[in-house]
């Protein structure tokens, strides 16, 4: 099993960051505008590229959000995505893990870079009020 | 052992990307302006934060650049950094690995995100002529 790891610091409180991880409006403002919840599952869609369905495993205000991928690309199904939050002075620190990949496939390399740019979108959203969610996300390659 | 992985696509030829990985001027234009070579070792410096010394293990035009970290933070020493290049239509694809970390320490999370932003700086440099090297690099957190 292999994992994607990232760390960002947001000039805000952990409660403000948590709101962007625990509400549909918050998630839609930094990851993808096409975000909806049905039957306890959050559906993130990226146009023709498809998307991911997440079951919320943990949601602890100001501390932790953890999802299980229940549908999407084969490489993602069964993996977990987690955001651990801690306050360090003026910064809300987000320790991000997308854990449980089976292999270091090229798609994992791609997703690692995309997660970094989406986390920077989360930081920008909370700090300035405007993120860069899909379909207007940062393009990193020919895979978008 | 655990690894940081990233994938970017640069709208350019692999030869153009290679020049930014194999020359001091190229490296200084996307990673850190304070880059120098002495006795076969490339020294990358980031002001008060210190830096990294890299021994070049492989340098194959248009294909591969691979370094061994010979000095720097304890967590980096002995790890390898590699850039594998391939052409896919109009894109030079960079498969990046910083491999051989002993543990998933918080510094590894940080470096993963920083590598992503520096690789986006490399992409921007080759596509537009201007990157975002230190000391004017993208700040991702309180650790810079």
Image: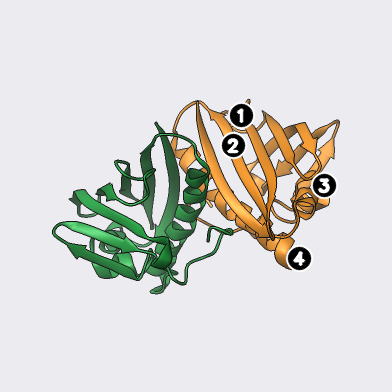
Chain colours: A orange, B green
Mark 1 — on which chain does it sit? A
Q: Secondary structure at mark 3?
A: loop
Left or right? Give the position of A79 relative to B6.
Answer: right
Position above or below: B6 against A99: below
Subunit of label 2: A
Mark on residue B79?
none
Q: Is the same chain shared between marks 2 and 1?
A: yes
| Residue at the image point whose x is 56% and y is 59% from the top | B140
Sequence-earlier tag: 2 or 4: 2
Q: Residues within 10 Å of mark 3 (few under 14, many from 20)?
A: few
Residue for point 77% across, 51% down: A20
- Find disc 2 in the rendering and name its residue: A98
Q: Distance of mark 3 from mark 1, alpha carbons?
A: 21 Å
Q: CA distance from mark 4 to mark 3?
A: 15 Å
Q: Are marks 2 and 1 in contact (CB under 8 Å)?
A: yes
Q: Chain of mark 4?
A: A
Image-quadrant location for residue B38: bottom left
């Amino acid at each position: 099993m292999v994992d994607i790891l990232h760390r960002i610091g947001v000039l805000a409180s952990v409660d403000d960051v948590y709101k962007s991880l625990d509400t549909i409006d918050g998630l839609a403002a930094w990851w993808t505008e096409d975000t909806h919840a049905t039957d306890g599952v959050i559906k993130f869609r990226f146009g023709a590229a498809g998307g991911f369905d997440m079951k919320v495993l943990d949601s602890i205000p100001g501390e932790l959000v953890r999802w299980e991928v229940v549908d999407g690309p084969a490489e993602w199904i069964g993996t977990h995505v987690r955001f651990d939050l801690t306050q360090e002075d003026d910064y809300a620190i987000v320790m991000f893990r997308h854990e449980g990949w089976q292999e270091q496939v090229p798609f994992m390399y791609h997703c690692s870079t995309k997660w970094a740019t989406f986390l920077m979108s989360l930081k920008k959203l909370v700090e300035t009020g405007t993120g860069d969610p899909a379909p207007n996300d940062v393009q990193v390659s020919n895979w978008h």
